[in-house]
Amino acid sequence: MRFLGSCIALSLMSGVPASAAQGVNPQLRSCTTAKDVPYCRVQRGRFVYDWTRAHRGEYAAQRNVAFCLRFGCDGAVKVNMVAACAWRIVIIGSDAPWERGDLMNYKADCAGIGRRGDAMAHILFERIYKRPLEIDAEELVTSLTHEHPKQPER
């Protein structure tokens, strides 16, 4: 319990939302007030499944997690633009294959979060990916837009 308290304190001090750094449960919403409760529960289960796979580096799961954090997946997930942006940075900043649409998703998900949100997304990226981003994400995207993207494995 003391360790968890230290993690929360450290997270708050760094400016990154504690929920984004703690795991999947704080990302979830209750389905009791959802328009379609059974569907919301399915979406929650899918998000939990994808969350685990995303942290293992699975590309499709990372895309799904970013999408749900951006749009809420029918009320099953709390919208968190900073975390969505961080996952988009993970996708394009990793050595894994990605698609051209990932660049557009990065631009859409990271637009409008401001300088503080951008800084928080980069900190969260480092916590997710377990290493610093070599160059700024915007510079990376600019350089990648002029190159052919890596093709995802099929």
Image (cartoon, rainbow, N blue to C red):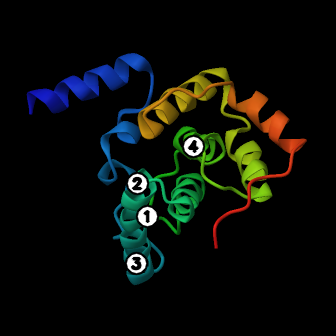
Which labelled disc corresponds to residue 4?
A: none
Looking at the image, residue 34 lies above or below residue 66 = below
As rendered, which of 114 and 3 lies closer to the eye? Answer: 3
Residue placed under numbered mark 3 in the picture: 42
- Looking at the image, residue 64 sits to the left or right of residue 15; the answer is right
The residue beneath circle 1 is 50
For the residues bearing labels 4 and 3, Cβ distance under 8 angstroms? no
Pointer 2 and pointer 4: residues touching (CB < 8 Å)?
no
Q: Dot 2 corresponds to which residue?
A: 56
In the picture shown, does residue 89 fall above or below 41? above
Residue occupying the point 31% across, 40% down: 22
Q: Earlier in the sequence, mark 4 or mark 3?
A: 3
Q: In the picture, residue 76 is in which quadrant?
A: bottom left
Query: Nearer the observer, disc 4 or disc 3?
Result: 4
Q: CA distance from mark 4 to mark 1?
A: 15 Å
Q: Can see residue 33?
A: no
Q: Residue at x 66, y 33 (%)?
A: 113
- Which tag is nearer the camera, tag 1 or tag 2? 2
